[in-house]
Amino acid sequence: MNREERIRSLLDRIRSASLDAHGFVTELELQDFRKNLLVQRGVGMSLLMASECVVQLEAFSPDFVAEHPEIPWAMIRGMRNRMAHGYFDIDLNYVFQTAKHEVPDLVRIVETLLHIHPQGE
């Protein structure tokens, strides 16, 4: 896999996991989310997967990351670190707000980046 393919693959994984996280909460309100452990874990794992891809992208292509400050790389990495190391101290309100209200913006940005250079060009 060449450099561009690897970047596209990581962006696509970020997009996919983010869409999963958002999809789990689209029809929920915070109180419903707080009562549903399965949805909490699904959202948490999806956000963790997306943010792990961010960490991999930062390591693989720091120049790409630097060229795209419209993505809050450091915030995403920080959330990943909190979720990966603070299992029982995760702020469910923050996770819900992120999945429901912030993830759609991230997905739009990632989709734009994916369409700048379509596969094969």
Image: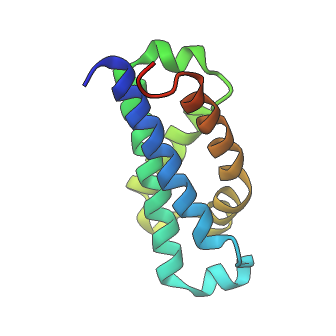
Q: Residue at x 46, y 59 (%)?
A: 46
Q: Residue at x 55, y 62 (%)?
A: 21
Picture quarter with the N terminus? top left
Which image quarter: residue 9? top left
Q: What colouring does the structure picture have? A: rainbow
Which image quarter: residue 30? bottom right
Relative to 26, residue 63 above or below: above
Labels in figure, total:
0
Asked whether, in this view, residue 106 is left or right of residue 12, the answer is: right
- Residue 37: image x %, image y %? 50, 83
Picture quarter with the C terminus? top left
Relative to 20, residue 24 above or below: below
Asked whether, in this view, residue 36 is left or right of residue 93, the answer is: left
> Viewer-proximal residue, 18 or 86?
18
- Residue 103: image x %, image y %? 65, 51
Relative to 69, residue 99 above or below: below
Q: Residue at x 40, y 36 (%)?
A: 10
Single out the residue that lies furthest toward the left: 1
Q: Residue at x 55, y 15 (%)?
A: 66
> Viewer-proximal residue, 106 or 55?
106
Single out the residue that lies furthest toward the front: 120
- Residue 3: image x %, image y %? 33, 18
Which image quarter: residue 52? top left
> Viewer-proximal residue, 26 or 43?
26
